[in-house]
Amino acid sequence: MSAVLEGQRGRVLNVNDEAASRHSVSQMLRTSGFSVLEAANGSQGLARAREAPDAIVLDVRLRDISGYEVCRRLKAAPETEAIPVLLTSAPHTASENRVEGLEAGADGYLVQPFEASELSATVGALLRIRAAERDAKRLAGDLAEAVEIRDDFMSIASHELKTPLTSLQLQLDGIARLLRGRENGSESALGKKLATAIRQTDRLSVLIDDLLAVATISQGRFTLERSEADLERVVTEIVEGFQAEAARANSTLTLHSSGPVKLRIDPLRIGRVVQTLVSNAIKYGCERPVDVTLSHAAEQARIAVRDHGIGIAPADRKRIFGRFERAVSARNYGGLGMGLYISHRIVEAHGGTIHVEPAEGIGSLFVVELPTR
Ligand SMILES: Nc1ncnc2c1ncn2[C@@H]1O[C@H](COP(=O)(O)OP(=O)(O)OP(=O)(O)O)[C@@H](O)[C@H]1O
Ligand SMILES: [Mg+2]
């Protein structure tokens, strides 16, 4: 082994009240490349630990305060808790004493007599663990900061995108009205193009709302605006709004309802959930019929959306509710995997549940259950 310079490997505090033994341990540490601070009893050890050594070698048989107690106090104080502590003790130490040492928070235990190489290797290992922990903490900090920056960026970008888009939507609606006035009911090629442009801006608007919702959820700023609402009305409006899209997808969309359901909910947000489920059912529904069923019992209202499309493998049924999770390839179906994630959070915030049930035959059955109280 090439010669190591004293101090090159870090600073170690050596706490031992027997001069000869302290001297020999210090000597071993120095020849192994550490610089050494010494303390001749427990209270001195506690005081010198504030000088921020990289590690502490602590004898358990101290006369003023036991080594175990010194260790416990080091680990209880915020300024010293991160310093690795290696306990050393007399030969033939019973295993329960070693256990006591480790329970006091020690990071390692060596029984006398030990060789310089054994001490050096053990202290070295403790320092490596400490360095790895520090790296991990720093990385976690960097990561949390990066996530925060991303979420802030997403919310600011969404707001900024929303402003010109809303104005564009108003302009397009205005043009469509003017055109209808002139054409007296007959739909021109221009009218059709305009309708397509309006649909695309509507989709863009939903996407931006979703991005904003994801950022709001990540930032922990997601809250409901509850009011007395009729769930049947919320669902009916969404289903009516999707009729044209269902027709374009060569599908049919039917609502089966058992009547009004008065609930205290956030109607816009619950509407968003129904919208997600219905748009998915049409998108993944292979041009086959989609059925929405609203029912309620004493404790619960239930919305079921059933399609006969590509279906979802059992292994994916939980995962798809996670952020950006998708179970289809981007080549076959576009999308960002936000809809179900947001829906799950919305339903959860209402104290309800959302899940996919294995549907009989082909397709999927999504069920939302909301408490009625
Ligand atoms: N009715 C359905 N049939 C089959 N798979 C579905 C259905 N609904 C959702 N999925 C699967 O769940 C995944 C997540 O759905 P989600 O609505 O969250 O995202 P998306 O549709 O991919 O994108 P977007 O955020 O644009 O809605 C989808 O990518 C798809 O794999
Ligand atoms: Mg979707």
Image (spheres, helix red, strand yellow):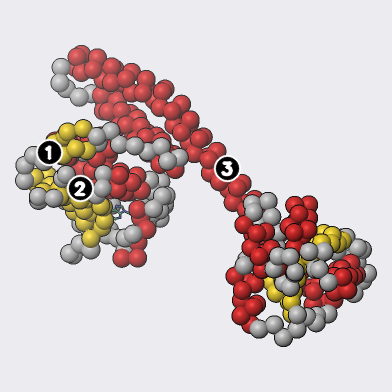
Q: Earlier in the sequence, mark 1 or mark 3?
A: 3
Please, what is the three-letter code of the amino acid marked with disc 2? Leu
Which amino acid lies under the numbered mark 1 shown in the image of this protein? Answer: Lys
Say left or right for 174 vs 31: left
Residue 300 screen position, x and y as percent? 15, 50
Residue 298 or residue 93, whichever sits in front: 93
Instruction: Please name the residue that numbered disc 3 is placed on.
Output: 145
Image quarter for residue 130? bottom right
Give the x, y percent position of residue 28. 87, 72
Quarter of the image where the C terminus is located: top left
Q: Is mark 2 within 8 Å of ligand 1?
A: no
128 horizontally vs 105: left or right: right
Q: Could you say whether the residue bearing mark 3 is in a helix, strand or loop?
A: helix
Question: In the picture, residue 75 is in which quadrant?
Answer: bottom right
107 on left or right of 295: right
CB-based contact (under 8 Å), mark 2 and mark 3: no
The residues bearing labels 2 and 3 have C-alpha atoms spaced at a distance of 36 Å
- Residue 338 picture quarter: top left
Name of the residue lying farthest toward the bottom: 92
Q: Which element carries disc 1, helix, strand or loop?
A: strand
What's the distance in space between the residues labelled 1 and 3, CA to CA?
Answer: 43 Å
Quarter the N terminus occupies? bottom right
Question: Which residue in the structure is indicated by mark 1?
Answer: 262
Residue at x-position 82% and y-position 64%: 40
Residue type, numbered disc 3: Glu
Q: Closest to the observer: 240 or 303?
A: 303
- Residue drawn at x 78%, y 64% is 41
Q: Residue at x 78, y 58 (%)?
A: 44
